[in-house]
Image (cartoon, helix red, strand yellow):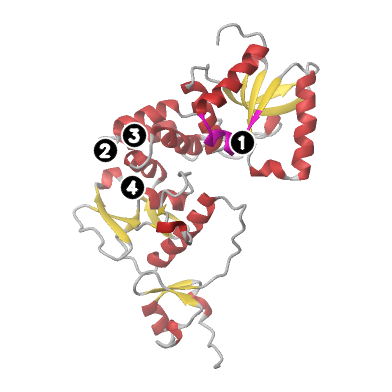
Amino acid sequence: MGIRRELPPELGGVFAVGRARDAGVGRGRLRGSDLTSTFHGARSVRVERPDPDDVPDVAKERARVLAQVRELAAVLADHAFFAGITAAMVHGIPLPPFHHSVRRAGGGGPPELTPLVVGVHKPRSPVRRARVRGIHLDPALAPVVEVDGIRVTDLASTWAMLGVELGERDLVAAADHLLRIPRHPGGFRPPERGPHVTREQLADAIGRRRGAERLRRALARARTGSSSPRESRLRLILVDGGLPEPVLDYDVSAPYGAFVACLDLAYPEWKVGYEYDGSGHRTQAQFERDVAKGEWLADLGWDVLHFTARDLRGPEREVVRRARAALIRQGVAKV
């Protein structure tokens, strides 16, 4: 077996075939087993990545989409850009699982990625390529920015394009992500940044486009204090189930002023709180912190319930029933 020639380092991990040929790479080397190609005229260096079972499906899907985006970007015309759900993946806007893929018949192998969404501004003709869904867009509805060297529609317009792709709750979760202002529990330090976009920017991006009514409803329900899509979903389940809207990201302090805990959702008036426990709560250290926090909250008269992804996949009426029962235990007569 011959020794494989190293690629010129200036090519990086993703490159256009023409650029490689200009750098002296032969045709045979471009067919090497260490390279992959999804799009004609582009190559990616094959990277073996661990695929542990505990990595969420959405993270796996995004990693695969980004790999294809980087490869296609190497050969895409300068006037083209990524849009819609593909732009959302680039920006890290949360999407439901399998929204950029479809399950294979019979369930074998990883889901098959759907074509990348590539836009151009009118009056240019849409991009026509295998594995690409080309669209043309009004420049006023699709401002373009660069993210890590990749041309994509900006955050606000990308969210607005999802109005024809997502249901109302998923649009709310995406807006919550964009509007969130990260803060340190207890407020001991100021927030490190503002929101990714403002509510006004999202409203302006809706304009007169398809899905505008759904987008406006979702924006009206979006909040700044939700830390994850699952927390957003829990809040919406409670409200849609007839409960009052809870306070988000609520700090609980002891009577003498010591910080006790920051609750995901809370009814401070009745000392009822709800926590969404994701995979980060599985570690021993976090488990011990959760136990200590729970005991302190109980000593202060709080009734705090914990919900997991399994709960949110189950019947919503059961989530609402448990949440309502905690309020009743705290003496709320009408709820």
| Contact flag, marks 1 and 4 (Cβ < 8 Å) | no
Which residues make up the magenta segment?
Answer: 306-315
The x, y position of residue 104, in whole percent, is 41, 58
Label located before the other in sequence (4 or 2): 4
The residue shown at (79%, 26%) is: 295
The image quarter in which residue 298 lies: top right
Nearest-to-viewer mark from 1 and 4: 1
> Mark 1 packing: few (<14 Cα in 10 Å), some, or many (20+)?
some
| Contact flag, marks 2 and 3 (Cβ < 8 Å) | no
Q: Which residue is mark 4?
A: 143
Nearest-to-viewer mark from 4 and 2: 2
User: 87 above or below 41?
Assistant: above
The residue shown at (58%, 65%) is: 49
Q: Please state which of residues 207 and 333 is positioned toward the viewer in this rendering.
A: 333
Q: CA distance from mark 1 to mark 2?
A: 34 Å
The residue shown at (65%, 36%) is: 277
Q: Which residue is mark 3?
A: 204
Which residue ends up furthest to the top in the rendered image? 333
The x, y position of residue 98, in whole percent, is 44, 50
Q: CA distance from mark 3 to mark 4?
A: 12 Å
The image quarter in which residue 215 lies: top left
Residue 313 belongs to magenta span? yes
| Contact flag, marks 1 and 2 (Cβ < 8 Å) | no
User: 204 above or below 51?
Assistant: above
Q: CA distance from mark 2 to mark 3?
A: 14 Å
